[in-house]
Every structure is written in C-alpha cells, then in structure tokens.
Amino acid sequence: MHAETDILFRESAAKALLDPQLRANFRRAMDGLITKRKAQFPDPEDLQELRHLSTAIRSRSLLNLPALLVQLEAACTRNGIQVHWAETCEQANQLVLDILQAQGATRLVKGKSMVSEEMHLNAFLESHGIEALESDLGEYIIQLDGETPSHIIMPAIHKNKDQIARQFSQKIKDAKYTEDVDELTAMARKVLRQKFLEADAGISGVNFAVANTGTLCLVENEGNGRMSTHVPPLHIAIMGLEKVVARLEDVAPLYAILTRSATGQAVSTYFNLISGPRGEGEKDGPQAVHLVILDNGRSRIYGDPQLQATLRCIRCGACMNHCPVYTRVGGHAYEATYPGPIGKILTPQMEGVGVRHDLLHGSSLCGACGEVCPVEIPIPDILVRLRREATHQDPASSVAGKGTGRTDAEDRAWRLWAALSKRPGLYRIVTWFATRFGWALPSGAPLLRDWTRFRTKPVPARRSLSERMRAERGSHD
Amino acid sequence: MTPARPPRAYFYATCLVDLFFPDAGMAGIQLLRQAGVQVIFPEGQTCCGQPAFNCGYWEEARDVARTQLALFPEDLPVILPSGSCAGMMKNHYPELFHGQPEEAQIKAFSGRVYELTQFLVDVLDVKLEDLGEPVKVTWHSSCHAVRDLGLKGEPQALLAQLAKVELATLAREHECCGFGGTFSVRQPEVSGAMVCDKAADAEATGASVVLSTDGGCLLNVKGALDQKGSPLKVQHIAEFLWERTHAR
C-alpha cells in the first residue's frame, strides 16, 4: 500500500513532527483560534442557520457562475476597472508583468493574496527585475526568510515571537533586538510605510467580487490592504474565478461568517469595497485599476457536480485550525500553496490526483473540517471521491490525472480483501487461524511494523464472536 | 418519532469486534437481551466494506456489501457495536449503491441500521441499575460515531444512569485518536503522534478506564497505552455497561 505517490506528505509530515518548537507553535495558535471562533458562535442553531445561508449563497453563485462572470466584467468595465482573463498561472503572471511594464513600474507592494502565491508571482516578477514587497505583517515576516505561507490566513503562524525577534534583528537594517510585540510591529510598520509611499503599484487579492455592481471586496486587519490598493498610482487585483457573487446583499452573510470562522472576529478591522480608480475630483485612489481573473483548473472542477463544492470555499482557514493532522505538522508539510483539509482536496484537483495522491491519504477522515466549514464543503466525502478517481479511470470523469494513482500492490491488496470478505466460508477459516496463531505474527511483518512503532501488537481474541455464537446456537439445538 | 420497540433485532458484530473484542460483542447482545429483545446473529458476517470504500475501491466494497446485505432479509433493526461501521451502512451504502439495481433495497436497509448505544437509548429507552464499585471513567467519542453517524450523547446518557460511575471528560474529547483505518499504516508517523496525544490526554483525566464505541479507536488507544505501560484499561462501552448492570 505504500505507493511512491504516498510518500511526499508522509515524509514532510514525519520531519515536521520531529520539531517540538513547530508543534508547540501550531498547537498554541490553533487552540487560540478554535477558542475565539467558538466564542463567536454561542448558539449552535444560529450558526447552522448562517452556515446554510452562506452555503446557499455560494452554491447559487456557482450555479450562475458563467453569467455572473460576464456580468462582473461588464460592471467592472463600467466602473473603469480593466478586466483580464487568464487560463493558467503563466498567463496570469505575464498579464501582471505586462500591466506593470506598460506603466514602467518596478517597485510594488502587495496586500495578502493566496492566488498570487498559487501563481508564484513574486518569484516571477523578481526574475524580471521587479521588487514585490509583501505588506501583510505575516507575509512580510516569511518573505524576509524566503519562506512560503504555512496557513492561508496567518502565513507566519509557524513562527513564535522569539523567532521573529531574532529574525528582525538580523534582517531589518538598524533594527535592535526586542521581544516586545508592539515594538516588532512598529519596526515592520516603519519599513512598510516608506515602501507604500515609494511604490509604483499595489497588488491585492479579492475576497468577494460583486457581479452587478462591479465591486471588489477586500477583508483585512492591518490597513495594508487599503494602503496597497489606494496609495500607489496603479492597483492590480487578482482573483480565482470562483470568487464572484451576484449582488452586494450576498456579501454581508459571507463576510459575517468569514471573519468569525477565520480569526474569531465579529468584523475585521478593515473592509474595503473597491469600485474603480480615482474619480473626477476625488482626492485619493489609484489612477488605474486592473482585475486579473484566474482559472488554473477551476473551470474543470466546476464541471463536476460533486466536486464543484470545492469552489464554495471562502478561504477562512477554519478547516486547518480544527484539523488534527494540520495542527501537528503545520502548513509546509503539505508542499502546496493551500495546506490543510481544503488543500488536500484542492491541490490534487489542480495538480492531478495521481501526483498528489499523498495528500488524499493524509487524512484520517475524522470529519472535523467538514463540521466547521462555513459553507459546508463535504471535505471527507470529496477526499474519498478523489481517492476513487486517483485509482480508477472513469471515462465520464474530468478529474485531472484520474487513474494515475493506481498501483499494482494496492490493487492486489483490495482484490484479496474482497475475495476473502465475500466468501464467509473462507473468511471463517482465515479468522480461525488468526485467533489461534495471530499472536505468532512477528511485529516486523508488513503493516504491523508501522503500527507497532507506537503501539503494542494487536492480538486477536482466542475465539471470535462468530465462533462463540455458533457454539451458543449449537448448545441450543 | 421513536420507532416502536421491536421484539427481535439483528446483531452485526463488525470485523474488529468479531476478531479483537468478542467480549464486547457478547456484552452488546446480552444488553439487548436484558432489555427484552430477541437477538438474531446471522452466520456469514465478515466486513461492512468501509476500508475498501474509503480507499476508492468501490467495486470491491460493493461485492462484499452485497454478501452482508443478504444476511438481513427481514424488516428488523440491524444493530452494530460500532459508530463507524453503522455510519458506513447507514450513510454510505446508499452512495455506494447509487445507480445500482439494489438502490431501493439499500435505502430501506439503511433506515434499519443503528449503533448499539443509539438503539439502547433512542429506541429501547433502557434503564440501567449500577451494581459495580465506584469508578472514574473517560469517554473517547469516535469521530465517525459523532460526525458521520450523528450520535447525540447516547453513550454519555447511558453512563449517566450508572450511580457509581464518574465521567471525566477528555481535554480534547472530539479530536481524532489517529486510527482512521488505513491512515494508521499509510501515515504511521502522524497517526502515531495523534494516538500518543490521545493516550496522554486519557491518562491526565485520572480515570481508570477509557471507553469508546468503536473497535478501531479501542485497538489504537489500547495499543498506545499498553506500549507506554499505562495501567489504564481500555474497554468497549457495551462490555463496561454489561459488567456493571448484570447480577453475577
């Protein structure tokens, strides 16, 4: 059962487990987030009602996705936002580069955007001589160390205060060593302020794009989103094509459940509604606003009625906060842009279910993710469905890499299991042997070897229940 | 609506209880008999098919599920001492047989499936009398029993009826123990970390017995506690309830 394809996550996770500092950082942070979220939803019935409403809004948006995207483009264009479409990350990167180069922009500041992480935009721009500075504090921290986000909401959550203190004192010019959080934040703020003022362009993500008004909604806590989108003369927003909703009224419930699920906040410190470039007589705002809409496999996911639920995601991160696997290994172990449960279903659908088979089996199917998901994505069911897709070539399926996770060893194992389990007579003989001689199996036997690293060897009972019930029946006859 | 109190019911052992916890299975049968239910234990029980289903091998799972379905021809409740296997038969059989000739039959069958404590509380409304010595126990709520099958505190309700049993809650009661079927051998390191934490959590409660309703969790948690030489006993709730309520 240990296919080559199972190994990537397993090895990275095993390595992460050996780092007690990392485990402590995640556990503490996730416990805090779980507690804060819980406090925001004191009434379970209210929570369920809000979840159902949010699910309905996201489902309805997806149902009308093609029409809503057309409407969004028209409304944005009316507002003076220039809309660009990208099928692949390469195309999206090129589009962003072209826009920047047309303006002669070489220095840009970025608000937090997971889609830009998906595109590996920073590295691409840097290779073309453009400095892309992350302005979200967490993103700034990891960028200093050349790392990727370990969480979609809190990208630097794998680090604790002391680690950041050391890092700042080494990497920020003229910085003194301090473990005071306010002082550390002020240090980053000082650097970033100057960069905001000097930047030729700002890049941001989009939390919700409103189709009928052409409004781009941006949720944030630090004001860096507003600075990135309003101070530089050029703003480029990037979004996955699933982010659209029909109307402004749809945003309110989604916003309410997003901030509560994500950080346990009733509202975020900033909520930006961007409806176009600086207008006639207005005192601030960029001269030009562009919106890049990225597909990168989303329309393929969209084509499958069950898997489409993946696109309901509003990127709150609650699934990772509550995941017993993520909590222990952290986000980097997933070797993917989107870690945790949502990443386990999204990444294989984007990159192929065969090549990322490891992620599909990195779950105990405990269901904690599906339970807290604000838009009720049935993550465990989708994992099982994708495990099926990975090992079978269904002609009707449009899943990327279908059938490429199949291995002879696993095939044989399940065929053998079925051959035994559908023949009660044979099963009876095998269980009889297991009860009599199971104890004699060496702990080093395949499968048992892994089990017994942390547990004693499971030994079958002397007589199975079936055998005892047969004896009982016999004594009555 | 509470279903009418049936005079007879099927008992489905599940492969893990059959092989590793036959005392728990026997205790479950005795609890049902004590409540006046005539228990039918069909010959030919193997596995519900969940392991293959969860790994994507649905044809194999269906082949096995068909042979098991044939064991329950009468319109009687089917009772399992496992939340996970009950969840498989109740919630995932309809999915597994979607578009198959048996689809309608499966829907009727799934409606008859109960986990043991669910049946004891929701259908039979049993009243237990505690005959045992004072003891402190802790409860591991199996993920599938709660999140998939949808148990709503039935095991705790049964334990609350026992006058001399003190229930100490785990710090992370609803966190997975790390079993997850093939997960325990496909991701042995993460699974191991999870079960070690669960074992430590159980020890920290000061309880002398860890109870659960699922063979997988029991095997996993017991293995980890035994490995570290813990004196904690790990027991299926059926066995615990039967030991404390029947006159010896």
Image (cartoon, coloured by chain):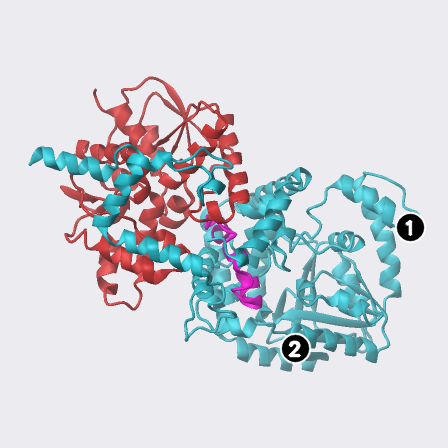
Q: Residue furthest right?
A: A174
Residue A246 makes an appearance in the image: no
Q: Is mark 1 on a helix, strand or loop?
A: loop
Residue A173's tag is: 1
The boundaries of the magenta stretch are A345-372
Q: Front-most of A285 and B127?
A: B127
Residue B58's tag is: none
As measured in the structure, the alpha-carbon distance from the residue carrying label 2 to the one carrying label 1 is 38 Å
Q: Earlier in the sequence, mark 2 or mark 1?
A: 2
Q: Do the residues labelled 2 and 1 touch (CB within 8 Å)?
A: no
User: Left or right: where does residue B127 sit relative to residue A243?
Assistant: left
Q: Which one of the lettered chains is coloured cyan? A: A
User: Left or right: where does residue A383 sit relative to residue A264?
Assistant: left
Residue B95: give x, y in percent of width and height.
Answer: 34, 61
The residue shown at (48%, 25%) is B229
- Say few, some or many: other residues with alpha carbon within 10 Å of mark 2 (under 14 / 14 to 19 / 20 or more): some
Residue A139: give x, y in percent of width and height.
Answer: 74, 55
The residue shown at (79%, 52%) is A145
Q: Reply yes or no: does residue A257 show up in magenta.
A: no
Q: Mark 2 points at which residue?
A: A86
Chain B: colour as depicted: red
Residue B40: give x, y in percent of width and height.
Answer: 16, 42
B226 to A137, vertically: above or below:
above
The residue shown at (42%, 23%) is B208
Q: Reply yes or no: does residue A352 show up in magenta.
A: yes
- Say few, some or many: other residues with alpha carbon within 10 Å of mark 1 (under 14 / 14 to 19 / 20 or more): few
User: The numbered mark 1 sits on a residue in which chain?
Assistant: A
Q: Quadrant of the image for the C terminus of chain A?
A: top left
As shown in the figure, which amino acid type bears the numbered disc 1?
Lys
As shown in the figure, which amino acid type bears the numbered disc 2?
Ala
Residue A157 makes an appearance in the image: yes
